[in-house]
Image (spheres, grey):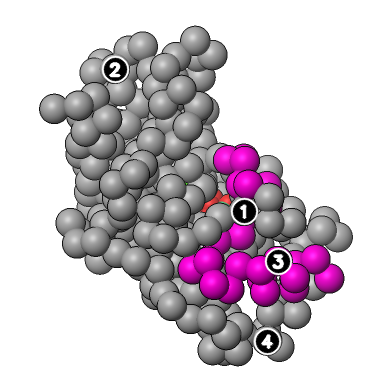
Amino acid sequence: MSETAAVRDLAVHLARTAGGIQRDRYETEFRVRTKTASIDLVTEVDHACEALIVEALNAERPDDAILAEEGGGEDLDSAEWRWVIDPLDGTMNYAHGYPRFCVSIGVQHAGRPEVGVVYDPLLDELFCATRGEGASLNGREIRVSREREIGRALLATGFAYDVHRSPDDNVDHFAHFVKRARGLRRDGSAALDLCYVAAGRLDGYWELKLHAWDVAAGNLIVEEAGGRTSDFRGGPANGDGLQTVASNGHLHDAMIEVLQR
Ligand code: IPD
Ligand code: CA
Ligand code: CA
């Protein structure tokens, strides 16, 4: 088995195991704290999922770098492989018992996205991509939609945790798209939003001020499903998530035009 395949299998195993924790503890009592703002939450379950993944990686792949949202990993400059982990994407949903959240694991090789795995434990949906090999949902190949008209498109977005105080709040873009698209969703998990673009359930998605762990897996899954990802000017998505646009490709230029207003 190639090293990439071994990395993918480990990422799948860890995403499923952490997802099992999320499923077991969903709608139970758990501690919730705030982070950068009163609306930026973290639960005991985020920490438990991250600890499980990071401990397993430290044991099985001690030379690899780890960037994990809650700070549990060690990001080594010298490492060939780097794991970029959102242990629970959709924490606000999770804390409210709103059934939309996931585990997201992206793995880079020599600085390039190589593997992406996103697992939704309630629907038991596993999205997976390996560079150059396409994208799948529960083992079946997925492709982006064929929609070419914004007026017939279902789009999604999200709002950053500084939305109460920052003027750069995405409300202007939301207002523009709500007048153009068939429908707009704000469902609270960036990683799943990207996977839904990949699977053709959404035609496009944009968001500001995301982080590397939100997009590391999802961007690769979109590209491997035949879609396009970029910044708000249409330039390459650089992986930090600060400006994220993902689409089926056909709608991309039209979305960029709206975002440039
Ligand atoms: C958040 C979710 C949400 C997005 C936020 C993210 P978290 O991640 O992906 O959909 O709108 O910008 O920070 O905090 O639940 O891991
Ligand atoms: Ca996230
Ligand atoms: Ca998270």
Whole-Å distance between the Cαs marked 3 and 4?
Answer: 13 Å
Q: What residue does disc 2 label?
A: 61
4 vs 1, front mark: 1
Q: What residue does disc 1 label?
A: 230
Whole-Å distance between the Cαs marked 2 and 3?
Answer: 40 Å
Which stretch is magenta? 236-261
Give the numbered dot on residue 256: 3
Amino acid type indicated by mark 1: Ser
Amino acid type indicated by mark 4: Arg
Going from the N terminus, do you reach mark 4 or mark 2 first? Answer: 2
- Please state the horizontal and vertical placement of residue 189, each as a whole percent of the image: 48, 60
Whole-Å distance between the Cαs marked 1 and 3?
Answer: 9 Å
Kindly indicate whether the residue at mark 3 contacts the one at mark 1 (C-beta within 8 angstroms).
yes
**Callout 4: helix, strand or loop?**
helix
User: Is 245 covered by the magenta stretch?
Assistant: yes
User: Is 198 covered by the magenta stretch?
Assistant: no
In this orientation, which residue lies closer to the viewer: 19 or 217?
Answer: 217
Kindly indicate whether the residue at mark 2 contacts the one at mark 4 (C-beta within 8 angstroms).
no
**Callout 3: helix, strand or loop?**
helix
Amino acid type indicated by mark 3: Ile
2 vs 3, front mark: 3
3 vs 4, front mark: 3
Give the numbered dot on residue 180: 4
Going from the N terminus, do you reach mark 3 or mark 4 first? Answer: 4
- Please state the horizontal and vertical placement of residue 41, each as a whole percent of the image: 56, 50
Disc 3 beta carbon < 8 A from ligand 1? no
Q: Is there any visible trace of residue 32 in the rendered image?
A: no
